Image (cartoon, rainbow, N blue to C red):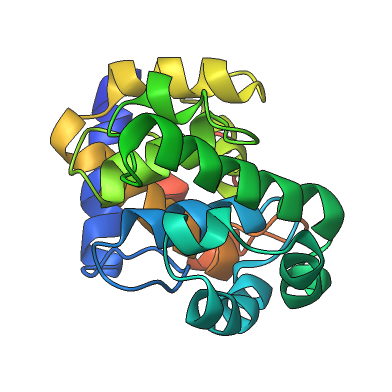
């Protein structure tokens, strides 16, 4: 089976398993700024922990204008349990200031502009472009990279390379939702340490099955 056919089958299978593909980070619907900030906080931190932190953070600093003027110590205090909080706090304020200076407080809608923001990588930029702006996107989080390798769709753990190769295999209009579904699948079935191959709907096309 060719890789493109295998990818299409994986998309179809996970669509059935997870008909509602949503980001596990919680933010006000269609609010690009809140998703951008939440995703920056999620680096080396669980989405569950971020979701515990962001309500208080956004209650005080709901947009780029307020965050740009926020006292660094207060932002650090609010996000302290997210890990690497000093670096992240500086980034949140710097991101907000750049948004105010260059974009009038709005979040840009291109990968190139988003990755020019302090601390924002391609993973975050793809998530914002896909979930907020409805663009084709490939979010290369750890679950996505692991599962694409196990399925034999890619043979690398380098995130930009995984993104490039998967863009070739996935239908553009389905790529963003597929990434969300893979994350859910990676948490429930194709786990990092002990994948549940006996219960896996993708076992027939997986060369890594136990």
- Who's the residue at 61% across and 64% down the image? 196
Q: Nearer the viewer, residue 26 or 65?
A: 65
The answer to whether residue 185 is seen in the rendering is no
Is residue 71 among what the camera can see?
Answer: yes
Q: Position of residue 171 (x, y in %)?
A: 18, 30
Image x and y of residue 31, in percent: 30, 62
Residue drawn at 40 percent across, 71 percent down: 27
Front residue of 141/60: it is 60
The image position of residue 121, as x and y in percent, is 57, 31
Q: Is residue 110 above or below residue 96?
A: above
Instruction: Tell me the quarter of the image containing the N terminus.
Output: top left
Choose between 121 and 205: the one closer to the eye. Answer: 121
Relative to 174, is 22 above or below? below
Q: Position of residue 182 (x, y in %)?
A: 44, 52
Question: 53 or 17, which is in the foreground?
Answer: 53
Along the horizontal axis of the image, is 110 left or right of 54?
A: left
Residue at figure coordinates x 52%, y 47% from the top left: 96
Location of residue 37 with respect to 117 vertically, above or below: below
| Image side of residue 181 versus residue 142, left or right | left
Q: Quadrant of residue 112?
A: top left
């Amino acid at each position: 089976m060719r890789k493109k056919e295998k990818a299409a089958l994986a998309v179809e299978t996970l669509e059935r398993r997870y008909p509602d593909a949503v980001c596990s980070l919680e933010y006000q619907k269609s609010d690009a700024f809140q998703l951008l900030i939440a995703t920056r906080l999620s680096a080396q931190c669980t989405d569950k922990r971020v979701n515990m932190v962001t309500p208080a953070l956004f209650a005080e600093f709901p947009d780029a204008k307020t965050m740009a003027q926020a006292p660094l110590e207060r932002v650090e205090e609010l996000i302290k349990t997210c890990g690497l909080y000093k670096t992240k706090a500086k980034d949140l304020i710097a991101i907000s200031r750049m948004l105010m200076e260059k974009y009038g407080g709005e979040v840009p809608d291109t990968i190139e502009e988003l990755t020019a923001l302090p601390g924002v990588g391609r993973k975050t930029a793809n998530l914002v472009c896909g979930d907020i702006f409805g663009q084709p996107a490939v979010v290369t989080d750890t679950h996505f990279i692991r599962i694409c390798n196990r399925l034999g769709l890619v043979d690398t753990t380098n995130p930009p390379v995984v993104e490039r190769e998967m863009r070739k295999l996935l239908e553009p209009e389905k790529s963003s939702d597929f990434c969300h579904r893979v994350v859910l699948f990676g948490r429930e079935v194709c786990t990092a340490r002990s994948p549940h191959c006996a219960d896996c709907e993708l076992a027939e096309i997986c060369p890594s099955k136990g």
